[in-house]
Structure formats: structure tokens, C-alpha cells
Image (cartoon, coloured by chain):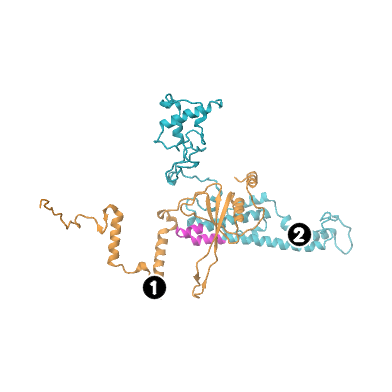
Amino acid sequence: MATPAAKAAVKALRPIGGKQIFLPEHIIKMVRPKDNQPPNLATFSVPLTFNKFDIRDYLFHVYNVEVTAVRSFVNQRRLQKKFRIHAWYRPQAGKMMIAELVKPFVWPQLLGVTEREEFDYKQFYTMETEQDKMNDESDLRKWGRIKPRDLAVTQDVSLMRKQAKLFMEDPASWAFGGLRSTEKWREVEVDVKLDKKR
Amino acid sequence: MATPGALRPSMGAALQICRASSTRGIIAPTRTVTSRAAARPAFCPSAQAASLSTTPALLRRHKYIGARVTRDNNKKRGESVLRRTGTRWRLSMSDEPLPQPVKPEELPPIETDPDHGLWQFFQNRNSIANPPLKDAEHGRAWTVEELRYKSWEDLHKLWWVCVKEQNRIATAMWERQNRQLGYGDAESDTRRKTVKATQKAIKHVLTERFYAWEDAVELAKSDPEIDLSGDGPAFTPKEYLEEEVPGLGSGEEVAREEVKANGSDVATSSTPDSSTLLSATSSEQKTAPTI
């Protein structure tokens, strides 16, 4: 644990700032890492005013976590329209920082869909999908835009889907031009034996 | 090492002959390990038949064991990356076996320290965000009235408890929304607002204390017992009992008035020490806030 002696030892080992802040109002979120991100990297969403030294000292003093290096980047937000006013504006950017930890930290696995009963996931999912569908329909009514996924499925597309499914089930059954099947394919040309004596 | 200097050229010559007879053409001269092994006289049957000369005739530019006959002075002739010949010269790590790469899934799993500080960012080690029913299990915020009796140390500690709770709630909110865990945003937001109210109350109390301190300074300027110059003691109390002056009231009343005047400094002087406060906090917890 963080005894004063242990903290002093760490301070002697690596640089730690001495600026005192008594009543901070920053909110720092820890963010689930991307796939294949090594466990010695931890990602945080921080206020725009934060710098690398700030998060290093913050993590050390508040959470007793040692950090060797920090990378930071700012995510610009997408342009949005104001509700009903339809004026374009850009929401404030968000800053994220990736800290290299001394002690690795592996995130717990994401809860499966069946394990989210306590969050009432089933109802949540149904409502979300319904809402999306309604939004799409209203868009269609308003602007007449049809999304590509809602375009009518032609016969060609359905046939290609069927073939793709068959191919995924058994890749060996595939040949150029279609499915290799004895019933469908029969030899048309027959070898003719020529009399060599002539 | 103990070999006399005169013997060395002859030994080199003998080894040269061995190498020439045993590894000719088959083994590349760059493979110094094999050529060395083959060059040992014990494994070389033709060593006895070869003529042995003590003259330094066989000494050439390259004196090391396994050196080939050179036609030019190119030290690197025959070395190729494509054919993986390796270097002509024996390197310090030539005998070191190269490590074999391991697939990430075959590596042993990395165990996280159960006392790792970053666990404090999670409400729940299993699902990061608490389910809504559990999230709603919290008391009310601390009121200004309750916090007025707390010392600065206690308020400061409580503030940092609030900061950590805010971080926990924000992390859970991010996880719930970005990973589509399900419902629970409303409960989380209520919790956040409760914490925020506590923080607001703390600032309220501290502001009150600051105003009280300002007023006390103003009063002290006109108080003969208090010296604000910074030289000598700041407070020199007068004698408790003063001579009664007819028409001005008793000495006790005067003293009481003085206490009242100094009483604006109550915030720090009248607060009990932190140990009693902490015990009061723990007993209050059944009814009072958990945040």
C-alpha cells in the first residue's frame, strides 16, 4: 500500500511534480483498451486542460499508480447540427491519454449479451432497434433517402448470398464458375479414339 | 595460453591441413563452428600423413583458424544475407541459441495485482458499471448544516472521496454507453448529482469560513489586544478582572463582549479534533450519507 516511505522511495526514483491542488474538479475516465493493446498501457479520457505531467502526478498521488511515460492526443468531434435550428457547429474536442504503467493492468472481459440481465439488456436492445427503425422511417418520409441496406433485394443478390453461405460452409465444394457437383456438371465433350494406323 | 610462441605457427599449419582435407567443398568456410570441430586433430585421420613444417610459410593475412585461401583482400567475400551465410568472423554471440518466437495466445496469462490502484476506477470488478438497482442504493448528499462542524482536514478528505466517486461514475457511464451494457444511465446520473451536491456543500462551508475570517481581520484591526503587525505575539490578553468604572457595567460583561468579538473565528477554534469527528461520522452513517 501507499505508505509515506514507499511514496518517498518512488519520488526519489522518478520525477514527480510538487504543485499542490486542493479542491480539483477534474473528472477522469478510464477507458477500455483497444483489442491487442498491451496490458502495460492504460487509456484515460481527461479534461482538455490536462497535460502529461498532470496525469502522471494525479495517478501517483490519488491512485498510487506509477507511470513511466504518457502519450496524449486530442479527438476532434464531428460537425453536428443544432436541434431544430439546423445551424452547424462543432462540439468541443476530447482529450485522451495513454499511460505506460509500471505494473500491468488487464481489464476484465466484457460482459456477454446473456450476462447483462441485471442491466435489462433484452428490453434495452429491443427498444434501441425499434427506435433506430423509427428514425430511419421518419428520415425516409422527410427526405426520401433510402439507405442501401433497405433497397430491394434482387434475385441476383439473393443467389449470391446463397452461394456465399454454401462456400463458407464447405470451401472445398467451390470451383470456378459455380458449385462442383456431379449432378449439375457432366462431361459434354467425349474423347474420341483415333486410329493411329491410318 | 602456455604454448610457446615458436610452436604456434606449426600448430596453425597442422590445423590448416586438417581442415583442407576434411571439409573441402562440402562445408562452407563461413561455418566456423563446424570447421573448428572438424579441424581437431583427434577427428582428423589424415593428420598423421600430412607433412609437418615449422616454417611460417603458411602464415597469411588471415591467421585465424578456418581462414580460407584468399585471392584478394576482401574480408567479406562470400558473405550473403540472402544465402544466410553469416559472418566470416566468429562473433561473441555465435554460440548463443536464438530465442524462438511464441504466439501471444500461448504465453502465460498476465495476472493483475489485486491491490492495483486502477481498480479504484471501477464500481464493480466484474462488469465495471454497477447494475442500476445497485447503483440506486445510496443515501442523500451531505448538507451544509452537517458540514459546518467539520474541520478542514475532514472536508478535504470528503472532497477527495467525492472526486474518486465522480471518476468511478464517469468510467461506468462510458463503459455502459460505448459497450451497450443496457439500462442504468438515469440511476448513474442521480448518483452523480448527489456527489455533486456534497461537493457544492463543502465549497459553501469553506466560503462561509472565508467570509468569517475576513470579518475577523477587520475586527482585529480595531482590537487593542491583537497585534497584526507581525512583530511579537499576535494576541496579548488583558487582565481578566478590570477595575470597575462606575457607569460602564461590570468587568464580566466587558469580557463577554470581547469573547463575542473574537468569536467570529469560531470555525477553526470551536471545531472538535478530527478523531472525535471521525467516530461521529461512522455513527451517523446509518442515517446520513454514504457518499
The chain displayed cyan equals B
Residue in view at x 54 percent, y 53 percent: B121
Q: Nearer the viewer, residue B202 or B43?
A: B43
Q: Was residue A42 drawn as part of the magenta stretch in this picture?
A: no
Tell me what hue chain A is rendered in: orange
Callout 2 amino acid: Gly
From the top left corner, tell me how far across and down residue B88 is, in percent.
48, 39
Q: Quadrant of the C terminus of chain B?
A: bottom right
Main SS category, magenta section: helix
Residue in view at x 45 percent, y 37 percent: B31
Tell how many labels: 2
Residue B256 is left or right of residue B13, and the answer is right
Residue in view at x 48 percent, y 52 percent: A37
From the top left corner, tell me how far across and down residue A71 is, in percent.
56, 55
Q: Nearer the viewer, residue A68 or B203?
A: A68
User: Tag 2, which chain?
Assistant: B
Note whether residue B47 is visible: yes
Residue topped by disc 2: B263
User: Tag 1, which chain?
Assistant: A
Q: Nearer the viewer, residue B274 or A3?
A: A3
Q: Which mark is residue A145?
A: 1
Q: Was residue B188 drawn as part of the magenta stretch in this picture?
A: yes
Residue A82 is left or right of residue A137, and the answer is right
Q: Quadrant of the N terminus of chain B?
A: top right
Q: Which residues are magenta?
A: B172-193
* Circle 2 residues within 10 Å: few <14, some 14–19, many ≥20: some
* SS label for mark 1: loop
Q: Quadrant of residue B268?
A: bottom right
